[in-house]
């Protein structure tokens, strides 16, 4: 906490010093306000008290760097949930109705925001995505911060391709499922990317958001604003290696066919702790499909 605002988290009426200490610690660790509010609500604090603890207005939207988000069509979600893609773990923490499929929640973490899903894709869907992508695979490019274009990157030794959004019925079906699962409009998603790693291939730790101060970033942001979330879906199982790692928190997700890892970042900043990578595949191959979510419609 900055020492220039010593009273920001002083103990207001109705709150305990222990709670305020917790708020101070979390805040100093960079936990975003929406996450703190959510945690307090989940722990049973009334909305107005939780907001008071966080020095937020008693009602209305949270201040947030990503204001330009469309309201959800079902009108069900709270203002809090609308700021970032996120699964609804309130209704049922174990299973989410994603429209045409019941998706399992295997693990969730607040900071960084990470949720691991099971049963997101069927075996047949995984096979069909690989089959449709295979003839179009090329050495992976990454968005080049300098130019705003794309470039080969030594940190990323996989092969890949992009589907257009809605390019095949299969892709549309999966995109609709993801939109429902994460409460985020399909139009805000980039086209699905398929990656193939052979033994030795990896994707070194990186952030998926676009670095704010790079010269090419303004060009990139014209197409739908910042990335705010990533869903990595596992299409097969490498025999050894190839986990998705989050080095800041020592977390590794083991690829299992049909499962997926989701993470979100409320600002383009390492404080989100969303540094992550694809560890080298040691034996066998790894196929994934990645969906990146933007603040606004991606055109
Ligand atoms: O290969 C993985 O597990 C991670 C992929 C990834 O970071 C990405 O596609 O942005
Ligand atoms: Fe990534």
Image (cartoon, helix red, strand yellow):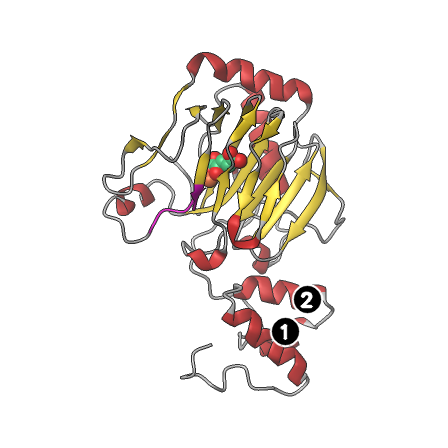
For the question of whether residue 120 can be seen, the reply is yes
CA gap between label 1 and label 2 equals 7 Å
Q: Position of residue 175 (x, y in %)?
A: 56, 31
Single out the residue that lies furthest toward the top: 135
Question: What residue lies at 42% left-to-right and 41% top-to-bottom?
Answer: 297
Q: Is residue 272 above or below residue 202?
A: below
Tell me the SS state at disc 1: helix
| Count of numbered marks | 2
**Residue under circle 1?**
50
Query: Split into 4 quadrants, where in the image is the C terminus?
Result: top left
Q: Nearer the viewer, residue 271 or 76?
A: 271
Question: What residue lies at 41% left-to-right and 56% top-to-bottom?
Answer: 269
Label 1 beta carbon within 8 A of ligand 2: no
Q: Position of residue 62 (x, y in %)?
A: 51, 65
Q: Give the range drawn in magenta.
A: 205-211
Is 171 on the left-hand or right-hand side of 148? right
Is 299 on the left-hand or right-hand side of 255? left
Q: Where is residue 42 in the image (x, y as percent from the top left)?
A: 71, 63
Are the two marked residues, 1 and 2, in contact with CB atoms closer than 8 angstroms?
A: yes
Who comes first in sequence, dot 1 or dot 2?
2
Q: Is residue 207 magenta?
A: yes
Density class for disc 2 (Cα within 10 Å; few <14, some 14-19, many ≥20) is some
**Residue under circle 2?**
41
Majority secondary structure in the magenta region:
loop
Q: Is residue 80 magenta?
A: no
* Numbered tag placed on residue 261 in the rendering: none
For the question of whether residue 187 can be seen, the reply is no
Density class for disc 1 (Cα within 10 Å; few <14, some 14-19, many ≥20) is many
């Amino acid at each position: 906490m900055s020492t220039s605002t010593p009273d920001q988290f002083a103990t207001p009426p109705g709150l305990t010093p222990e709670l305020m200490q917790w708020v101070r610690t979390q805040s100093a660790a960079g936990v975003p306000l929406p996450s703190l509010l959510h945690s307090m609500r989940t722990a049973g604090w009334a909305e107005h008290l939780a907001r008071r603890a966080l020095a937020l207005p008693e009602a209305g939207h949270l201040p947030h760097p990503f204001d330009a988000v469309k309201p959800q069509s079902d009108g069900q979600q709270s203002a809090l949930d609308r700021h970032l893609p996120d699964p609804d773990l309130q209704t049922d923490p174990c299973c989410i109705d994603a429209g045409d499929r019941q998706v399992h929640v295997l693990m969730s973490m607040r900071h960084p925001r990470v949720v691991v899903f099971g049963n997101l894709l069927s075996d047949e869907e995984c096979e069909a995505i690989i089959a449709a992508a295979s003839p179009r695979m090329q050495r992976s490019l990454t968005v080049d911060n300098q130019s705003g274009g794309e470039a080969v990157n030594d940190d990323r030794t996989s092969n890949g391709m992009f589907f257009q959004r809605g390019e095949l019925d299969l892709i549309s079906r999966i995109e609709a499922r993801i939109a429902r699962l994460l409460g985020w409009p399909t139009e805000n998603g980039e086209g699905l990317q398929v990656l193939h790693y052979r033994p030795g291939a990896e994707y070194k730790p990186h952030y998926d958001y676009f670095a704010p101060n790079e010269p090419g970033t303004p060009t990139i942001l014209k197409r739908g604003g910042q990335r705010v979330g990533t869903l990595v879906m596992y299409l097969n199982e490498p025999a050894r290696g190839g986990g998705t790692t989050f080095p800041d928190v020592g977390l590794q997700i083991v690829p299992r066919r049909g499962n997926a890892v989701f993470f979100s970042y409320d600002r383009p900043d390492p404080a989100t702790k969303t540094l992550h990578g694809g560890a080298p595949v040691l034996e066998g191959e790894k196929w994934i499909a990645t969906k990146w979510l933007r603040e606004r419609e991606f055109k």
